[in-house]
Image (spheres, rainbow, N blue to C red):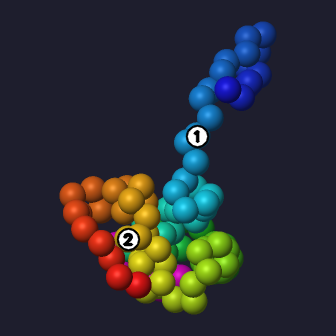
């Protein structure tokens, strides 16, 4: 299904986004990918994605709640345990089984 966009007399249709992994929003998923890449400080993340530190703090709080974790290591473990999320973060990484 597509969302209509009104432009002048015509209506253009744009495809809907595919959902982000782990039940996160696209903004939260972007922060998770940056955290998995080593950016752990809120100020550093805010600088990379060009938004306020407070916005990043809010997204991180939402990520902790949705993934039921309390630190960055827990977030990375959730990504490693989910096949789809792991492939998006680390495309070449192959893991047989992760013990939590």
Give the residue drawn at x 27%, y 56%: 91
Q: Is residue 40 magenta?
A: yes
Residue 17: mark in rendering: 1
Q: Position of residue 32 (x, y in %)?
A: 48, 70
Q: Quadrant of the C terminus?
A: bottom left
Give the residue drawn at x 48%, y 84%: 74
Q: Position of residue 22 (x, y in %)?
A: 55, 62
Question: Dot 2 corresponds to which residue?
Answer: 80
Residue 74: mark in rendering: none
Q: Main secondary structure of the magenta part?
A: loop
- Residue 44 in view, yes or no: no
Q: Is residue 71 magenta?
A: no
The magenta segment: 37-42
Secondary structure state at the residue bearing disc 2 = helix
Q: Nearer the viewer, mark 1 or mark 2?
A: 2
In the picture as drawn, the residue positioned furthest to the bottom comes out as 70
Give the residue drawn at x 37%, y 71%: 80
């Amino acid at each position: 299904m597509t969302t209509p966009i009104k432009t002048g007399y015509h209506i253009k249709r744009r495809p809907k986004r595919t959902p982000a992994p782990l039940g996160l929003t696209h903004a939260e998923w972007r922060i998770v990918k940056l955290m998995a890449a080593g950016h752990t400080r809120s100020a550093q993340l805010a600088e990379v994605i060009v938004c306020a530190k407070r916005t990043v703090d809010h997204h991180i709080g939402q990520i902790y709640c949705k993934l039921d974790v309390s630190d960055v290591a827990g977030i990375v473990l959730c990504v490693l345990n989910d096949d789809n999320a792991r492939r998006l973060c680390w495309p070449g990484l192959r893991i047989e089984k992760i013990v939590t």
